[in-house]
Amino acid sequence: AARNTGLEAARAPFITFLDSDDLCPPGKTARQLARLRADPEAAVIVGEVMFFREADANCVPLPGTRTMRILGVNLGAALIRREMFDRVGGFDPQIDQGEDLDFFLRVFESGAKIATETEVATLYRRHAANLTNDTMGVKRGALRAFHKSLQRRRAQGADQQADAGKVARRGVELLGRPAHPGRHRDAGEELQRGQEQAELFAQGGPGVHADTLFRVAEWSLRPLQAATSMRATGPGSPA
C-alpha cells in the first residue's frame, strides 16, 4: 500500500525504491538513468544486490563484515520507466510479502525488455528485524506470486501462453541468480535444478501443480536464505 501511494504521488518518468534500512550507492541512479536513456527499448534496468551488515558513509562494507552479491529481483536495485507501471499495474495489496516478485513477473510476461548490469545497485542490510527473516511468509508470498502468474498465462490461451511462457522462464531464470556463479559452491547444480523447475513453470499447462510451484519458489529464494550466513570480507571476521 505504501509503495502504491508513492507511485500515485510520483511525477518523474523514472522510478526506483529504497527501504528505510537499506543504502543506495553513490551514482547508482545517475548511472542507471544514463543506460536507460541510451537504450529506449529497455523498460527496466536491474543491478546487483549486496547483502551486508555494516558499511561506512560511502556505502562500502566495513572490513570484517559479511557480504554477499546476487543479481535478482529487488526494487531498490532497479530503475523503472514510469509507463511500465501504467502498463502492468502497481503492487498487489493482497500479497504482503513477494509483491515485488509479483510485479516483476508481470513485467516479464508483458515482453518488456529488462537490462541488467554488474554494478552494485543497492545495499541490503541484514539484521534481526528483516521481514525476510520470516522464511515461511516469504515462501507463501512467492508461491502466491507464481500462482497468479500461472493463472494469467493460462487465461491468455495456447498461442499467447507459449510466448508469455518464454518470457516468464527468462524471468524465473533471473530470480535469485548469483551475480558470480563461479564463486558459489554448487551454484551450477542449483541453476540446473532451478531451470528444470522454471521450464515446467513456464509451460503453464495443466500438469503444473502446487508441488512444482513450491520447488520454483524454494529455488528462487535460495540466495536470500543463504544471505543469513554470509561470508566475511576480511581477516578476524566472525564465523
Image: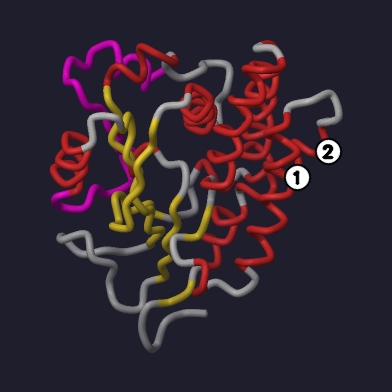
Of residue 117 and residue 53, the one placed in the foreground of this image is: 117
Q: Does the magenta stretch include residue 5?
A: yes
Q: Hey, what amino acid is under mark 2? A: Asp
* Contact (Cβ within 8 Å) of mark 2 with mark 1: yes
Magenta stretch: dominant SS?
Answer: loop
Q: Quadrant of residue 38?
A: top left
Q: What residue does disc 1 label?
A: 215
The answer to whether 54 appears left or right of 229 in the picture is left
Q: Position of residue 202 (x, y in %)?
A: 68, 34
- Nearest the viewer among 2 and 209 is 209
For the view shown, which residue lies furthest in the bottom direction?
235
Label 2 belongs to which residue?
A: 211
Q: Residue at x 52, y 60 (%)?
A: 227
Amino acid type, callout 1: Arg
What residue range appears in magenta? 1-27
Crowding at mark 2 (Cα within 10 Å: few <14, some 14-19, many 20+): few
Q: In this view, does 101 lie to the left or right of 205?
A: left
218 in the magenta segment: no
- 115 sits to left or right of 197: left
Residue 46: horizontal and vertical position, in percent?
Answer: 35, 43
Is residue 2 shown left or right of residue 135? left
Question: SS at mark 2?
Answer: helix
